[in-house]
Amino acid sequence: MPLSSAPSRAGLQAQAGALHEHFQRVRQHSMALAAPLSAEDQCVQSMPDASPTKWHLAHTTWFFETVLLQPHLPGYRVFDARWHFLFNSYYEALGPRHPRPQRGLLTRPGIEEVHAYRAHVDAAVQQLLAQLDDEARWRVVEPIVTLGLNHEQQHQELLLTDILHAFWCNPLLPAYEAPAGPSLRLAAAPPAESPWVDLHGGVVEVGHSGAGFAFDNETPRHAALLAPCRIARRLVTCGEYAQFIEDGGYRTASLWLSDGWAAVQAQGWQAPAYWLAPDDPRLTRDRPAADGWQVFGLQGVRPMDPTAPVMQLSFYEAAAYAEWAGARLPTEFEWEAASAQMQQATGHVWQWTRSSYDPYPGFRPLPGVAAEYNGKFMVGQLVLRGGSLATPEGHSRPSYRNFFPPAARWQFSGLRLAKEIQ
Amino acid sequence: MPLSSAPSRAGLQAQAGALHEHFQRVRQHSMALAAPLSAEDQCVQSMPDASPTKWHLAHTTWFFETVLLQPHLPGYRVFDARWHFLFNSYYEALGPRHPRPQRGLLTRPGIEEVHAYRAHVDAAVQQLLAQLDDEARWRVVEPIVTLGLNHEQQHQELLLTDILHAFWCNPLLPAYEAPAGPSLRLAAAPPAESPWVDLHGGVVEVGHSGAGFAFDNETPRHAALLAPCRIARRLVTCGEYAQFIEDGGYRTASLWLSDGWAAVQAQGWQAPAYWLAPDDPRLTRDRPAADGWQVFGLQGVRPMDPTAPVMQLSFYEAAAYAEWAGARLPTEFEWEAASAQMQQATGHVWQWTRSSYDPYPGFRPLPGVAAEYNGKFMVGQLVLRGGSLATPEGHSRPSYRNFFPPAARWQFSGLRLAKEIQ
Amino acid sequence: MPLSSAPSRAGLQAQAGALHEHFQRVRQHSMALAAPLSAEDQCVQSMPDASPTKWHLAHTTWFFETVLLQPHLPGYRVFDARWHFLFNSYYEALGPRHPRPQRGLLTRPGIEEVHAYRAHVDAAVQQLLAQLDDEARWRVVEPIVTLGLNHEQQHQELLLTDILHAFWCNPLLPAYEAPAGPSLRLAAAPPAESPWVDLHGGVVEVGHSGAGFAFDNETPRHAALLAPCRIARRLVTCGEYAQFIEDGGYRTASLWLSDGWAAVQAQGWQAPAYWLAPDDPRLTRDRPAADGWQVFGLQGVRPMDPTAPVMQLSFYEAAAYAEWAGARLPTEFEWEAASAQMQQATGHVWQWTRSSYDPYPGFRPLPGVAAEYNGKFMVGQLVLRGGSLATPEGHSRPSYRNFFPPAARWQFSGLRLAKEIQ
Amino acid sequence: MPLSSAPSRAGLQAQAGALHEHFQRVRQHSMALAAPLSAEDQCVQSMPDASPTKWHLAHTTWFFETVLLQPHLPGYRVFDARWHFLFNSYYEALGPRHPRPQRGLLTRPGIEEVHAYRAHVDAAVQQLLAQLDDEARWRVVEPIVTLGLNHEQQHQELLLTDILHAFWCNPLLPAYEAPAGPSLRLAAAPPAESPWVDLHGGVVEVGHSGAGFAFDNETPRHAALLAPCRIARRLVTCGEYAQFIEDGGYRTASLWLSDGWAAVQAQGWQAPAYWLAPDDPRLTRDRPAADGWQVFGLQGVRPMDPTAPVMQLSFYEAAAYAEWAGARLPTEFEWEAASAQMQQATGHVWQWTRSSYDPYPGFRPLPGVAAEYNGKFMVGQLVLRGGSLATPEGHSRPSYRNFFPPAARWQFSGLRLAKEIQ
């Protein structure tokens, strides 16, 4: 929401009002996502990579308190000084913090206290925005609020992936049962078109173009040189992936990267993360064996839908599938260049690319505390593009770079294929 | 509660009524202990050795359902067949079970469902006892109910040690704030007497004598041969233990057993488990440094009381302290032989002995499922005698054998000294 | 070799000469045991619990240098001051030392240097003993030399158990091929007698009686009270143990201690440590499948001999076998009391007892550095009695207490049964 | 050594003779590198990433036996069929293999047996090459021999990095003492020039151009688009790196990638891998404290030379140093484009780039067994360019892509800086 020209005071207030409305919508969405969960659900941490719902609610609030309110709202009273230690995620510049693997031990503060924290901070943000009558302050404050909201939207997706993992660890396999409102089901598939998008190669521009918000890791926009190739117009489906399994994909070393094969052996992978074989004891403890693969998701256990995009895949599995299919994964720049012509680009699953998460030429991190937001993770991870069923409306864009380590399976992550033009 | 002679039907009903009253008292005590805790508090598991409060409440109920109601109450309807997998602790004979380290992931069933489970089982037990009109059935049922209640009392103590550990892991160091009713504070110290109890040695009888309930591991009662020795009449205090620390006890290898010294090095032990040095960041984050040792307990953080019995000690620390003091730990038989003349024998802390937890001569486990109760743990652990502030009234007795691995520190465990008579 | 009365100078020299002869025999036996091994064999460490042959040769030499020569041979020149750090095993009082799991990384000093070290120390000991002409010094020196020789004999057995484990880790399964000289095969079984030794119970004296050398852990000799029981006259054989396997012993939880069952599951135990199923790939890689169990030992792979004592058992397996056989393990005092009437008491396998390795009443460790020899290990281990095919002639005695953790399988450890007299 | 046109039989024999001469030189160089090492040195494995010298000698021989002789020399007799299991490194297509972390347990086969293996295979290769009289066979055989020799040269460098790591683990810090012949010391630094090479950006060709041998990962040659930047003409020196340390580089989180900072904390890094602080106990155990940093290398411990290129750095440290220096690491294509104008491009240290080890556009692995050579490692690693003091003469080239995980420190790895042109 940058200002195009020097605004009047009334114009500023209108802008601030609009920003506050957006702020409220995003903040309420977090609460709506947590609403179906009990206090116990919101406290649990099922693995070090995941965080409790309650922690997400508090951490996103802490972010506003620390980066926006403390420096920019004179007289702001910190809600509880001891919580700074609890809800800092990974900002070294902000001092020591509670160890990540122990977030699930924080039964206190309780969920009501966290709600009070959110209300306290929301009120202070409202006050700050209501008082904004100066363009210079707007130019400082608006980017922080916008960053905070995009940050909260990222945690909204994580809130869902993390509780889904926690429920997966419960032998009762409870359903999250998405709230009324924003759907958390796969977007309807558009009408079929030709299966491949052809890219003719040459120099293309990639990265964020300047209009609207983007994270620092999408910049600077720059030229990239592509070879001709084709990108699949649609995502790989569960039905296609089931054929890979059927064909012995998980038993054929030659399809796998070395680290991927080691993961298959060490973890005993035989299917995507939340697939249940018909004879799985979690299914048969209280009912007869099913007919085929069952898939656990936000709506609980359902029969595998062969037309739905496959998800809960690691990069290793995505790459092995592509090898098996006589194809490969697209690079992140191929993906970006073809994105306008794709189907299912977003709203279904994040799509693993064959690109390591490296800095763009000339990349510089954001100034201040936000410098730790993206840049320091630029090693050992892979780029995913697109957006998933759990990505908040309007949060993603074609230049968006999501990233995870290659073994990560608890995200809504799938793939589309690419191949050389012969 | 064995029957002395063949009772009348009215006598049986009176016995059964008394047993049911006892049953209700014990069951309600569990609920009272859980009452100060939030749903989140009751769900957390801070380490594999500890269990969530909610799990304790459900597991003790499962024990009655599985061992008493299913075999002995015709027509009993199991509350939820899937819960058998969740709340079996370690009974191999009863099939596979939820992995112990993942008990904290069970956000479902929720606390209200567990309360409903308890009510369901309590009603069934009431029904079973109300229908008892046959001496033969009484002789079968009564021992199972009594075992179940003693079992539940053990979990009442664990409920407290486990939540205390969970709170210790929370940087906010919340207080449990014991409920009104049974005090969870150290019993008042009796008037001082001469510091040692002298044992003249010779053959003594040890183990359970036959009257009243006892666990299988206290039997058979048998003769043991003791050398002359003296046992401290009182427990070692925090003040005495602080001198050991001050004197470099945690830095002096020669005082320690080899495994103990390794634990000191690997874990960085410098004091009992819940002692906080005055400059501990958990203390100084929101207030100035204290004057001396602070001790965390059920009432939260308090200044160390030099006259209180020291607790939260491992066997290794107890043995090292004894070495430093020119003494040793008593054997379990010395402890038992001297117990009548001791002060603070129970109601304060469990007391580590210098006895490995081995079977008594001629030991046979209980028949049936209960065979797994005690006997299979008879290796690698040490015997503790006495009883703690958290041991339910009337649960312990002089022949009682508690046992834990030598590195365990999260129990209310301390020591009393012994030495040879020169 | 204590002196009975004040000896003449000539008597002293004769005593010292005899001691030196004994010293030479023991020292040469170590070299003979190492002789079949290459320099590489002597350097390897196959697990943290085992040590390289070369390290055994050097450490036993270091013991004489540090405990005997440095304090008691005026003018003694240390061979290489830096080796003190390398070859101290676990003596905290002697300062920091090379980490145990990294002993196998010591390719330097090489085997010739270690031989030179041994020669240097042997010459110094010879010199010290040749100069002994004073009874007071004899009373100081003789116990140290004797302790050092008993210490070296313990390492002679470990040298064999450790190299056998290393060879077991080699897919080629090489044979040690015992040197000419002392046999490392099982002693011939004596003629059959009645299968049980009956003990009538009552007070018996146990522990070392005072004549000849003993370790501190065998003292003080004291009275113990035994219940009547019977002890098997012979050891459990491989054939008997094979029936336990055949009968599903390794799949029957109810036979096992809880920690033992956990070890079976975690380690995948299905037979004693060095038993090979006929279809083991190490066997079939270069020859057809065998007919039955094959057993790896110092002579390489051989068909299982059903009459030979079973060995390479953990305590857990020994206890589970006894349970399966409707018996139990003897306590160490039962073993000691019955030892005179046993067959195969020594020379075959160490025999696990049902006794934790606790101190005897009134136990005090040896003075000085040797205080760390035995006492500090008195927790978490089990007592083994007897002696094995690898125990040097004359090293063991009925009061000898060997000890290992309950999961240890790389020793020559087996069992004999005991049971109550009904 | 491809043939330009159809050769005569004599021409073929000359080519084969030249190839055999090259074969002998490379094979003898391996033996020369092993010559200063004892049998024990050649057997040790100091960490799972490293391999024993003896294993390197055998594995490179196994490669010729398996990929060249068995398929292409009729009548070839395998030296020992059981060794196939021992000396296969990671070729899944060739069946199961000895676990990598247990290579150091292979005391058998002994070093003489491995020498015999090498002689056996060398003779067979000689025979195969002597019989080559057919162009078609030459076109099959020559690439395999050449691949095998390049493979052996890679292991020659690893042999040195691995034994250096093993010696580093020995408290005596022995010196390797390079053999006469090829120097293993840093190449002399060329005269100083201007400190930066300027790259004007635009499209450049990268990858192997087609003449001579290259690994598959260097292909296909392709166009890449570079932004303008400058690359340091010289390597970063020990003196410069010492300033980074002095300035608190290892204590400043903001300089580090997140995984790098975690490694610093977890591993306690305070300097490059083989640097010793003056008060290191390994130095002061037998001599007085030194004046400044000491550096351990092939020649043993030496005072740090401030003009020598720094090495034994992880990628994390290289990137943190660059950040501290207000620069960055070059990408692999920037490095390649500037290489002709660099000093110290090779012969000193491998240079970490800011490029993840991803496949080139259109990359296809080698056919057959060699498909597993490079491609399956293309995730989670970083590219290093150049060549080190230990890289065999003629082995590297500007398009050469070495790769290691970002935490690897036991290679001869350093860095040169790059920066944007403002």
Image (cartoon, coloured by chain):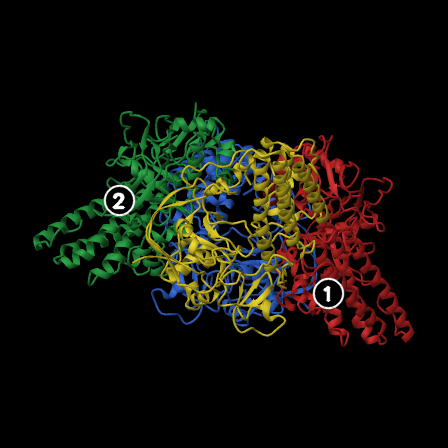
Chain colours: A blue, B green, C yellow, D red
Q: Quadrant of the C terminus of chain C?
A: bottom left
- The three-letter code of the residue at mark 2 reads Met
Quarter of the image for residue B349 reads: top left
The residue that disc 2 covers is B31
Q: Quadrant of the N terminus of chain C?
A: top right
Whether marks 1 and 2 lie on the same chain:
no
* Image marks 1 and 2: residues in contact by CB distance under 8 Å: no
Q: Residues within 10 Å of mark 2 (few under 14, many from 20)?
A: some
- Residue D407 vs residue B127: left or right? right
In the figure, B177 relative to B399: above or below? Answer: above
In the figure, B278 relative to B126: above or below? Answer: above
State which chain disc 2 sits on. B
Q: Secondary structure at mark 1?
A: helix
Nearer the observer, A36 or B403: B403
Nearer the observer, D39 or D258: D39
The residue that disc 1 covers is D63
Nearer the observer, D352 or C255: C255
Q: Residue C407: horizontal and vertical position, in percent?
A: 48, 53
- The three-letter code of the residue at mark 1 reads Phe
In the figure, A268 relative to C398: above or below? Answer: below
Question: Which residue is farthest top?
Answer: B291
Which residue is depicted at the point 37% across and 37% down?
B330
Which residue is depicted at the point 74% across and 47% down?
D412
Q: Residue A14: horizontal and vertical position, in percent?
A: 48, 39
Q: Is residue C220 visible?
A: yes
In the figure, C89 relative to B341: above or below? Answer: below
